[in-house]
Every structure is written in structure tokens, then in C-alpha cells.
Amino acid sequence: MVFGIARQRRLDLVTSTWDTSVSTETTPQPNSDDSGDVARGPQFCRPTPAESGVLWTLWLTYGAFYFCRTNLSAAVPGMNSPVSERGLGLSGEETGWILASLKIAYGLGQLLNGQLSERISPRVLLAVGMFCSAGLNVLFGLSEGFFFLVFVWATNGFCQSLGWTPCVRVMANWVPVPRRGHAVGLIGTGYQITQGLTYLIAGQAAEHFGWRGALYVPAILLTLTGVFMLVFLRDAPPEDQGTSPGDPVVVAPVSRPRMPLAESLYWTLYNPSLWLLGLALGLLNACRYGFTDWGVKHLVDTQKIGVGKATLQFFVIAIGATAGSYLAGWATDRFFGSRRAPVVCLLMVLLGVLSPVYGFLAGHSEIGTMVVLVVIGFCIFGPQVLLVGTAPSDLAHRGTSAAAAGFVNFLGYMGAATGDVVTGHYSSAAQGGWRSVICIWAGWAFLGAFITGFLWNTSAQKAREVVMPSFAPKLASLVALGIACIAIHRGQQPAELQWATYFGLVALAATFGNRWFAVLGIIVSGAGVVTVFVGYLRKSGITWDQTAAMVAFGLTIVAALMVLIAPKGHPCESLSSPPDGADA
């Protein structure tokens, strides 16, 4: 009883520090006449022909984005070839940075485009994304300079981020709530199938027209799909569309409280479960894009075959990916009481075991390679589907599901970007070659499984009762900036940056007395990112010291931001949960 009273006082202390005013958003609620129909589930209201047409158009539209996103894997062998062989002569590490630039821009674009899709017509956003991505692929094929290639592919990543959220908005406009789960699952299979087709199409184009053909041919396909989308897709049903027993249920909007931004950030960033999910997804994505971005190059180098034949073997990974995406969620509900972590953990352990098996079979058996790639696709995309959407929504504090999914996805793409750079670096013979890379992929999978294991028995209720202690981000910011300080010292960065970093360490130490000193830490870290990036442009090579410094500065910014958003009276060393009024 005493604990319950003390706990409630801590909750009151936290929630009282934010503005109690709330904005409203509309939530569909069934009309009284149709409430029984909704309760009877999706079988009662069968999809109309118009709704089915929209869903299949979305299936093709979002899947087509992968034509100009996955295709670069077929171009990588040619890009690494010497200039005398009509290649670009890029090193593995430079290629890794080009691939990583798309993930970084995509992750940042997701943070922005979720808001744009609420204010701009989805058809317009989709058209801009598709046509610009196709144009940028053509421009990439015509370009040669390393830094310009990074810029072009990063811009392509931002355009690619215009695909998902507009599709979800159109789907929500056309499909009633009882059928939306099925609709999202249907749309999700589109990009798995298109990914496999992209390996075949881009690989054959590179085989017959050179590596640049892997950019040009998919660009044509994406452009044609964009025209198809503009002709057949509509943002929403006509307002005067009549209703019949088979039509979607008419809904009436009601108001519900929307959590203020600062409060939403707090409950998201201070949720330890989301950090664990984000780290696990980052490691999984590093392994995922190791296979999907570099797998064709690995087969070309290992089996001494052409790109066309390598992609004929590699495209089967999409078969396992499609099955894993569908069955993983079913398994969590069927065998683990809707707990996602056990399935994620087990599949990532299997992925770690199969990675060296793939490395062995790739040099001995083409059939064996294809079989293990199917299973690897299952083990990658089964957990990936759970980690990007279902698990964050389950473990998020009430009213923060969308913010939680965005945060976890952002960490996932940062992990993917880091993985591309690491894979590119170690793929060279001087750094150990593909044998080392395969071992690194396996290590990432095992580490991701280990992290997910901490959530094995975590239920939604348990996750919502835990909040990170206030000293954790303060300590983390000091550690991260300390690592940056060591990295810039080893990398012989300008003395001014080193002194600024020392000043930042002092400021962050002062946050234990006054949190507003974190602003100085953010300023110093932001300046550090810019300074190190300029160092990239001035030097012909990219060093690990520079990479480590940029990552450490970025983590410092996140940790310092967490210090700033913590409310006065944060329940340090205690358990907490959001106010009941913020229920999702």
C-alpha cells in the first residue's frame, strides 16, 4: 500500500511538469448502426472491387521502389573493377560508404516524411519519390567521383523514404480497421518479391550492358510503375460514394488526447526496452544488408563467376524472406503468447549458425548455396518484420507507438549503415577477406540474439512499468564524448577540436548539477561532426578514427538531448509509467 502511494506520487511529479493542454486527433469509431458489423470482423465486410484495386496498386507501387534501391548490389562488382576494365576502381570501404549513405538518408527521411504524408497528397509524394529515385539512378550511372556518388546515392535514399508512409496513409483511407492487418501484410509481400526480381533484372542488365546497366534498366521499370500509379491510384474514396452491405463501414470521428511532443520523446527515449530493440535491429540490419548488398559480390569473388550467374543464385533469398515475414508473427502468437523476443532471438541464433555454413557452401556447391540462402532469408526477414513494427508497438509506453517504431527503425538504419562500412573495409584481402566478413556477420547475429534475450519474458505491461534512471544518459554522454576525444586524438584532428571536446566533457559533467549544460555538449558534438566530415573531404582515404569519432559525437548528441527532455523531478532509480490519460 505504501509502495503504491509513493509510486503514484512519483507519477504525479513527472506528469505535472509538462503542459497539461492537449491537442486532438480523430479516431475512427463505428456508427451505432454498424457497430455490430464491425464486431463481426473482416469477414462481414468483404473488400469492394475498388478497395482491392487500390491494394494491388499499392502492392506494386511500394515494391517497385526496390528496383532502384536493391539494384546497386549487382553493380558493386563492376564498381570495384579497375578503370582499365571500365569500372570505377573503388575500394571496398568506399563502396561501403556509398551503400551506407542511402541508409543514413533513408533513416533521417523517415523522421521527416511521416509528417509530410499528413499534409501533402500521398500520390504527389509517391510520384516525387519514384521519378526522382529513377532519375538519380540514371545520374549515378553517369557519374564517377566518389564523393559525388555518395551525394547522389544519399539523395536517392531520401527519395526512397517517400515510399512507405504515403502507401500506409492511402491504405488507411480505403481499408476499414478490421482488414488493415491483412492489407499491410499483403503490401509487405510486394517488396520481398520485387527484391528477388531486382537481383535477376539488375544482374542480367549488368551482365549484358555493363555495371551501369544495373542502374538504367531498373530506373525504366520504376518510371513506368510511377506512371501506372498516377493513372490508377486515388488518395481516398470519393466523398459521395454510397454504402451497401458490402462496402467499408462508415465511421465518425471522435476526439482523443494527443501526447505533447516533449512527453512523447521522454517516454520513448527513456524506455530501456526500445533501446534493446533498436540495438538488436541495428545488428540484424547490419547482417541483413551484408547479405543483400554484398552477397552478389561475394559469390562473384568466391565462385569466379559473372554477375548474371551470381544473381541467379542469390535471388532465392527473397523466397525465404517472404515466408519469414508471414510466419514469424504467426509463431509469436501461436507458441509464445504474443511475446516477440523469443522468436527474434531463436531466428537470430540460427542466422548466426547458418552464416559460416553459407560461407563454406558458397565455395563448394551452388545448389547448397541456394538452399541455405532460402533459410537465411527466412531468418533475416522474420525477425526484421517483428522488430520494425510489432515489437516496438507492444513495448512502447501508452500513446507513443508511432514514435517508438520510428526510433527503433532509425537505430536500425544507423546499424545498417555502419554494417556496410565495416563489410566494405574487411572484404579486402589485406583485412582478412570474405572469411573475416562472414564471421563478423555471424557475430552480429549472435550479439543481436543475446541483446534480444534480455526481453525474452518481457510483456507489454512489464515494459511500460520501467523507465531509465536520470543519471544513465548523463553518464552515457560522458562516455561517448570521451570515446570521441580519444578518436580525434588518434586521428590527429585539429587541436581546436580537441580542446573543444575537453570543454564539452566539462560541460557534460556539470549536467549532474544543472541539465542545461547539456546544450554545450550538443553544440560541441555538432561542431565535431562537421569538422570530421570536412576532414573526409580533404583526405583521399577514410580512417577508422574518423568513423569512430563521428559515431561517438552522434551518440553524445542523442544522450545530451535525453538529459534536456527529462522533466524536473524525474523518478531516478524508480519504476514509472505514463499517465493513464495517454492511453493509445
Image (tube, helix red, strand yellow):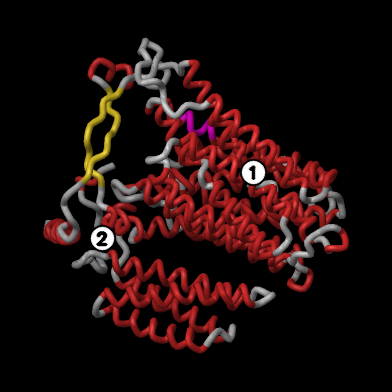
Mark 2–mark 1 CB contact (< 8 Å): no
Report helix, strand or loop for mark 2: loop
Residue at mark 2: 575
Ranked by sequence position, the earlier of labels 2 and 1 is 1
Residue 27 is situated, as x and y percent measured from the top left of the image, at: 28, 33
Q: Disc 1 residue type? A: Ala
Q: In the displayed structure, does residue 433 sit left or right of residue 526? A: right
Which is in the foreground here, disc 2 or disc 1?
Answer: 1
Residue 544 is situated, as x and y percent measured from the top left of the image, at: 62, 75
The residue stretch that appears in magenta: 182-187
Report helix, strand or loop for mark 1: helix
Neighbourhood count class around disc 1 (C-alpha, 10 Å): few under 14, some 14–19, many 20 upward: many
Q: Main secondary structure of the magenta part?
A: helix
Residue 199 is situated, as x and y percent measured from the top left of the image, at: 72, 43
As for residue 552 lying within the magenta part, the answer is no
Q: Quadrant of residue 445?
A: bottom right
Q: Is residue 465 above or below residue 527?
A: above
Q: Nearer the viewer, residue 548 or 61?
A: 61
Residue at mark 1: 134
CA distance for labels 2 and 1: 50 Å
Q: Is residue 420 above or below residue 209?
A: below
Determine the residue positioned at 15% across, 56% down: 8
Determine the residue positioned at 59% across, 78% down: 545
Q: How many marks?
A: 2
